[in-house]
């Protein structure tokens, strides 16, 4: 299981969900089941775990990882976008739940599988879809989108200062030959930026890969929808726990939780107060311990926020 993905901030997740026997919990980002497996132990006897993921590979790995959960715990797997949590719950006949976990982003398994095309260090097709059964691949986007749109994606989702130059180089190259592999993208980037890294530094091409991945999977659009739908599904006292891995994700989590708690965010107009649906339990986001970051460097950017549904 840990070869698939090491669960991040596991102790903090289990505590923040405030788990008890008999509860119904949704893991909206099942991955390898790294969080779900110990959750099942804590909701036994009699609980239910509903695990969602867009990626069939994740559902297969989690099915294996959760094959030995306590007998009294019911486990349901649903291939679904977490934005569609309401439909997923409806499908398994559940109306209200005690907790929802969203551990955003990609899994180590996705990053480490060359055929998925997520990582700049492997040669593979430029795919990057979490759900390989539908939608446009990274190659589809890069070979067809207008230059200005590619630049926008790189700047907004990757905070890449060279966005315009990179977009221009992509468009120049694709005029003679489409980009097909991760290597084609890496070669393009090499022509636009110095490709040097010191130990411990993040590779300069990482921002472009992140930006394209976010665009391919429309990741940011799904987060706010999911937080609102998850909150609607919570019983009074139920907990929503979200782990974000970059500032764009965390800003959406922070602002959406603030709005759900009754605070208007980013408005210049005096307006009617919002309903107070949740209480935010984390004034500042929780972060991993130094020890966890040493053991699992992928945890280093994690920020966890917790909200509780009001009565
Ligand atoms: C960081 S991993 C989760 C790892 C998991 N918590 C574990 O410890 O094994 C994120 C997972 O969420 C899935 N995912 C990302 N965006 C999604 C979305 N919009 N809907 C459903 N699943 C999504 C990915 O396919 C990936 O498997």
Image: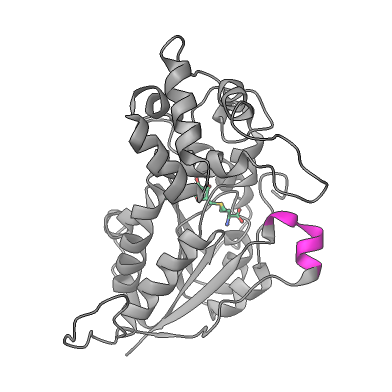
**Residue 243 visible within the image:** yes
Image quadrant for the C terminus?
bottom left
Vertical arrangement, residue 14 with respect to residue 271, above or below? above
Vertical arrangement, residue 214 with respect to residue 115, above or below? below
Position of 302 compared to 140: left or right?
right
Q: Tell me where residue 97 appears, x and y as whole percent.
A: 38, 72
In this figure, which colouring scheme has been used for the structure? one colour
Task: Judge by depth and name the residue closer to the eye, 205 or 300.
Answer: 205
Question: Which segment did they paint magenta?
Answer: 291-298
Position of 237 compared to 101: left or right?
left
Single out the residue that lies furthest toward the top. Answer: 176
User: Does the segment drawn in magenta span residue 24?
Assistant: no
Splitting the image into 4 quarters, where does residue 164 fall? top left
User: Does the segment drawn in magenta span residue 292?
Assistant: yes
Q: Residue at x 66, y 49 (%)?
A: 5
**Residue 98 visible within the image:** no
Vertical arrangement, residue 43 with respect to residue 180, above or below? below
């Amino acid at each position: 299981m840990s070869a698939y993905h090491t669960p991040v901030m596991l102790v903090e997740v289990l505590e923040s969900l405030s788990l008890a026997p008999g509860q119904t919990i949704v893991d909206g980002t099942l991955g390898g089941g790294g969080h779900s497996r110990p959750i099942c132990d804590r909701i036994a006897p009699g609980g239910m775990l509903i695990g969602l993921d867009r990626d069939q590979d994740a559902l297969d790995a989690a099915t294996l990882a959760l094959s030995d959960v306590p007998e009294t715990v019911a486990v349901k797997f649903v291939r679904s976008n977490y934005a569609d949590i309401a439909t997923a719950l409806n499908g398994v006949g559940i109306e209200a739940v005690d907790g929802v976990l969203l551990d955003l982003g990609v899994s180590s398994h996705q990053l480490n599988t060359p055929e998925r095309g997520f990582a700049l260090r492997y040669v593979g097709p430029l795919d990057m879809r979490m759900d390989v059964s539908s939608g446009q691949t990274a190659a589809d986007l890069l070979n067809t989108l207008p230059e200005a749109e590619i630049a926008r994606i790189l700047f907004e989702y990757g905070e890449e200062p060279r966005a315009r130059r990179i977009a221009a180089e992509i468009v120049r190259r694709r005029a003679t030959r489409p980009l097909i592999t991760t290597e084609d993208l890496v070669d393009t980037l090499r022509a636009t930026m110095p490709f040097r890294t010191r130990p411990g530094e993040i590779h300069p091409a990482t921002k472009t890969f992140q930006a394209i991945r976010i665009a391919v999977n429309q990741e940011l659009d799904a987060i706010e929808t999911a937080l609102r739908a998850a909150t609607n599904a919570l019983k009074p006292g139920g907990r929503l726990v979200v782990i974000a891995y970059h500032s764009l994700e965390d800003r959406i989590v922070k602002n959406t939780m603030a709005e759900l708690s009754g605070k208007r965010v980013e408005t210049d107009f005096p307006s009617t107060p919002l309903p107070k649906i949740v209480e935010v339990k984390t004034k500042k986001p929780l972060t991993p311990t130094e020890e966890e970051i040493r053991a699992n460097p992928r945890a280093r950017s994690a920020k966890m926020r917790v909200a509780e549904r009001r009565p």
